[in-house]
Amino acid sequence: MAENGIGVSVRRKEDNRFLIGKGRYTDDINVAGQTYAAFVRSPHAHATINGIDKSAAEASVGVIAVFTGDDLAADGIGPLICGVTVPSDDGEPHRAPAHPALAQGKVNYVGDHVAVVIAETQAQAREGAEKVGVDYTALPAVTDTGSAADDGQPQIHDVAPNNMCYNWPFGDKDAVEAAFASAHKVSTLDLVNNRMVTNPMEPRAALAEYNAGTEEITLHLTTQNPHVHRLVMSAFNQLAPEHKLRIVSPDVGGGFGAKIFVYAEELVVGWSCRKVNRPVKWTGDRTEAFLADAHGRDHVATAEMALDENGKFLAMRVMTKANLGAYLSTFATMVPSYLYAFLFAGQYTTPLIYSEVKTVFTNTAPVDASRGAGRPEATYLLERLVDVAAADMGLEPAEIRRRNFIPKDAFPYQTPVVQCYDSGDYETALDKALALADYDGFAARAEEAKSRGLRRGIGLSSYVEACGIAPSAAVGQLGAGVGLWESAQVRFNPTGNVQVFTGTHSHGQGHETTFAQLVTEQLGVPIENIEVIHGDTAKTQFGMGTYGSRSLAVGGVAIAKACEKLIAKGKKIAAHALEAAEGDIEFADGNFTIAGTDKAMNIAEVAFNAYVPHSYPEGLEPGFDENAFFDPMNFSFPAGTHICEVEVDPETGVVEIVKYSAVDDFGKLINPMIVEGQVHGGIVHGIGQALLEVCRYDSEGQLITATYMDYAMPRADNVPSFDVDYAPTDPPHNPLGVKGCGEAGAIGAPPAVINAITNALGVKHIDMPATPENVWRAAQGAA
Amino acid sequence: MPIVNMNVNGNPVTGEVEGRTLLVQFLRENLGLTGTHIGCDTSQCGSCVVHVDGKSVKSCTLLAVMADGSEVTTIEGLANGAELHPMQQAFMDNHGLQCGFCTPGMVMSALDIVNRNGNELDENTVRKELAGNICRCTGYHNIVKSVTAGAKAMGD
């Protein structure tokens, strides 16, 4: 093993700049002559626009320009697109209403973009925005997921009757019905998956510059995927040709999905810098983030499980309504469909699964991927249903899981819902988690808690998720408009240090360290001589970005493949220099050696020879710089068991998480310290959903949770420390043997927490978030 | 417009500001000290915590003119040359940061916790004291470890 190679908890290379205040986030960047943008946003959830009076704003101090949807349309900019087609049950593709970046005669949610004001200072831009006169006629609004498609509801888009986007049935309905008809027992559960606001701590921002001489736009953005932004803005939004558009995504303060998407503000700022021929900067504030970042989750579902007399799952049926908001965000359609229903097998051998997903438009912010994206919704539904089934059958929650697990010798395992799982050992993870949680000691702890007037509960969640997004052919068949390979370039400089260019993007995940560890392991170059570069379309050849826990499982492999090419070329160069046959050269620990001798040449010397090829193999290209693309053969399937233990005060409804244990299978760990940090963060994201967070609109479509005073983010005193361990398996499809770890906690945690609370209270179900009020009511009902 | 004078990270600074200019805006825009961040607009998230006359404040909640004549310390003022402050070092050693955006506020709050509670901190105290700083990445586990370790190192 290299000193700082695979498996070592190397301290992060990126930390120093963040710790001394030298991170470089988009809002930290200023350029000469920059102007500021402020957006005029709809105060109505649903309204027609009768007219816009720009005159007072245009006359306001410092205002340079005021633009509306007409100005964008005149230049042919937009509309915003959704990149994945999902078929509806009428044989048509999903309904795709026009999504103008600035409104065209109608607004459809509070925060919808009406106009932009460009001014000399941020304050002047905001003052100008206040002075734009918009004449609205308010319309009745629809916000409720469950009833949005009912007859008589206000209609949002002409192309979407009954506010329906698609109704997507999936599975063998008749076979599932037959299995239910003959089942020993049917367990049923109605549940809500609460709407969340993703809330990375850095608000979105954009800084656009136009060079009239080169006709190039440079757009600094808070994006998780700069090349995807460039592709979409060029190919679909007509902002600029791809070779005249540079996207720079510098340090980004968290993403969690919310910074995947192409947003109206980004497109408008990118376009307006050319209109005013000056740099334009926009920095969103937190209220704008609540109003106009894509939200997550928001399902209403009914789930049923058919069981035989031994508690074996025979069939499962799920009816879901999912809210997509007012317009389709970039990947909105695939989240409640492919990323959701393809996970319903979970860790179990359930042979028959049928589901229907009805997606609806409402007068709320667009809904799209948020940490886990579809998989938390599927896992919550399944792992809650399994606990209900356990109670119905009189089985212990661990036992019913064990009876239904896919056995470890059955991998690769083809589920009835498309996915073919790569590797897994679910029972080992369960056993380790039970030991870590001291499950056997729970009864005594519950008894002791009772003496203090508290009810103690314990809950399991055995999740599997599909990440490492994604095999291009597979997603293409499903209607995606892109390939989801990843690219890398590994470049030696003549002096022997290494620059690694990746198309993934790090916004907290620590790629600069993890990827450097891969390279030091493979090439033997000291880690301090390796720099990982990302987030600039002018530097990295191409990439698809970071989401779906794909960076290591897809992007890391691309890096490894580029390193392999360097080693192959290096053997030729070393053979020539050492006067040996290429076949006799071995490479290890950074040295090319003639096999069986001590004659060797370090890779840094080889690199120097490649750039100063005075004595060099005939016909070989100079240079020591290779690129590689990697398209995965399958998704990656992390899995594990999380166990949550709570104490509930029935007098106040307050829930305290007293112990939380997680055992995950992420395959091989490159940097265990970083992986554990990802697990912690994911778990707290999941605990936030389970206990605290909910995004609420009132019946008129006003967002009533638009600040951190109304939307309860998990804070340090809401959560405990965690016990984390691993039960790794070796995924055969992945050349590095790795799986993804970034979303697992957010997927596994919510059902573990709720299962613990229902266990404590002795109730069938409680909806998230289990706030003190909700828990108190449930406790009173159960008492 | 008012003129403000203050001592920031040991350096006397002066600047012309509007009456409404917040301290965080003065630090970021006038002085280019962009390590102090703005994560919300309701004084909830703590990304903007700095020290004014030795006490932690949310610099989005103070007008620049209110800090006139004060000693201000920001994240940029902690390290001694290339040597990190023990609290910064503890965050690095304990993986107390991921995206880095909340980190300056966390470190500045951590130092204030030590100033008020001493070098031997228990987990419960740290968690309660950090409730004014929101992090979305770390789940707080490693921040709590960092603060506890940093406090101890400051006493050594």
Image: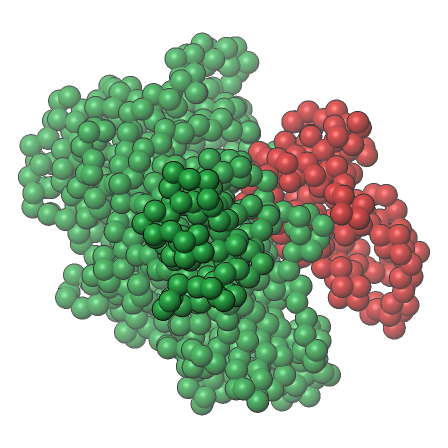
Chain colours: A green, B red
Q: In the rendering, at what x and y percent does residue B51 appear?
A: 81, 47
Q: Is residue A121 left or right of residue A280?
A: right
Q: In the rendering, at what x and y percent does residue A115 appear?
A: 54, 79
Which quadrant holds residue B141?
top right
The residue positioned 51% from the left and 18% from the top of the image is A454
Q: In the rendering, at what x and y percent does residue A294 appear?
A: 45, 60
How many circles with numbers are drawn on the protein?
A: 0
Q: Is residue A481 left or right of residue A528?
A: left
- In this rendering, the answer to whether A188 lies above or below A90 is above
Q: Residue furthest front?
A: A579
Residue A455 in view: yes
Which quadrant holds residue A477?
bottom left
The residue positioned 26% from the left and 49% from the top of the image is A634
Which quadrant holds residue A369?
bottom left
Q: Nearer the viewer, residue A773 or A231?
A: A231
- In this rendering, the answer to whether A750 lies above or below B40 is above
The residue positioned 48% from the left and 77% from the top of the image is A245
Residue A163 in view: no
Q: In the rendering, at what x and y percent does residue A286 appear?
A: 60, 58
Q: Nearer the viewer, residue A749 or A355?
A: A749
Image quadrant where one finds the C terminus of chain B: top right
The residue positioned 59% from the left and 78% from the top of the image is A209
- In this rendering, the answer to whether A594 lies above or below A239 is above
Image quadrant where one finds the N terminus of chain B: bottom right
Q: Nearer the viewer, residue A210 or A201?
A: A210
Q: Nearer the viewer, residue B20 or A106?
A: B20
- In this rendering, the answer to whether A157 lies above or below A292 is below
